[in-house]
């Protein structure tokens, strides 16, 4: 049996095939690694963590779309982004919290937001947690939110 050498054309083809295989493997690995890094959360969770309402991880898990990073409640996120201090941030959840109670009960309470604002001044963290629970819960689970405030 005679030893056959690889022709220049065969050598070129082999290197091209190996290059393509390497590119496919590298691209697949990159895509795989990208899937592990979730998109940045846009819910202004930093202020929640800073003010002691809930941790950064808790906020991101509850308030951000894991696929897009978009805030599940853009109104709350915008208000938190504009809040000058923790008291203002705590009041951010009053509007949407009251809207959720009204939507679930079918009974409007025109005093809900002003009552919430008053309670925020006395118990900002507890009031914020209760209202974000309302915002993020189904109507069936709304009653459980009164227990999260303290």
Image: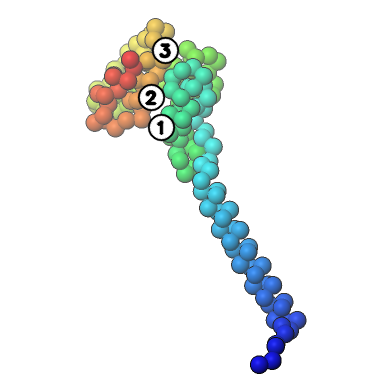
Q: Is residue 75 visible?
A: no
| Comes first in the chain, label 2 or label 3 | 3
Q: Residues within 10 Å of mark 2 (few under 14, many from 20)?
A: many
Label annotation for residue 124 = 3
Tell me the quadrant of the picture where the N terminus can be found. Answer: bottom right
**Structural distance between the alpha carbons of marks 3 and 1:** 19 Å
Query: For the residues marked 2 and 3, what is the alpha-carbon distance in whole angstroms?
Result: 12 Å
* Farthest residue, direction bottom: 1
Q: Residue at x 44, y 19 (%)?
A: 53
The answer to whether residue 99 is above or below residue 20 is above
The front one of 28 and 68 is 28
- Asked whether 16 or 107 is in front, the reply is 16
Percent across and percent down for residue 42 are: 52, 33
Q: Position of residue 125 (x, y in %)?
A: 41, 15
Quadrant location, the C terminus: top left
Q: Position of residue 136 (x, y in %)?
A: 36, 30
Q: Are marks 3 and 1 in contact (CB under 8 Å)?
A: no
Residue found at x 25% / y 23% = 143
Would you say the residues marked 1 and 2 are in contact, meaning their CB atoms lie under 8 Å apart? Answer: yes
Q: Is residue 47 above or below residue 39?
A: above
In the picture as drawn, the residue positioned furthest to the top comes out as 122
Q: Secondary structure at mark 2?
A: helix
Mark 1, secondary structure of its residue: helix
Residue 37 vertical position relative to residue 7 in the rendered view, above or below: above
Instruction: Choose the circle earlier in sequence order: 1 or 2.
Output: 1
- Mark carried by residue 62: 1
Q: Which residue is mark 2?
A: 132
**Which of 96 and 1 lies nearest the eye of the viewer?**
1
Left or right relative to 4: residue 73: left
Q: Secondary structure at mark 3?
A: helix
Q: Residue at x 47, y 44 (%)?
A: 67
């Amino acid at each position: 049996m005679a030893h056959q050498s690889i022709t220049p054309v065969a050598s070129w083809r082999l290197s091209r095939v190996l290059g393509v295989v390497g590119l496919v493997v590298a691209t697949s690995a990159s895509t795989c690694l990208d899937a592990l890094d979730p998109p940045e959360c846009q819910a202004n969770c930093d202020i929640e963590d800073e003010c002691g309402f809930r941790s950064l991880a808790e906020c991101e898990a509850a308030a951000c779309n894991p696929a897009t990073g978009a805030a599940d409640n853009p109104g709350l996120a915008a208000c938190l982004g504009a809040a000058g201090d923790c008291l203002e941030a705590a009041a951010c959840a009053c509007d949407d919290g009251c809207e959720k109670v009204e939507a679930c009960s079918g009974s409007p309470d025109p005093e809900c937001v002003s009552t919430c604002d008053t309670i925020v001044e006395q118990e900002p963290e507890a009031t914020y947690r209760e209202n974000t629970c309302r915002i993020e819960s189904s109507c069936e689970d709304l009653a459980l939110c009164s227990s999260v405030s303290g």
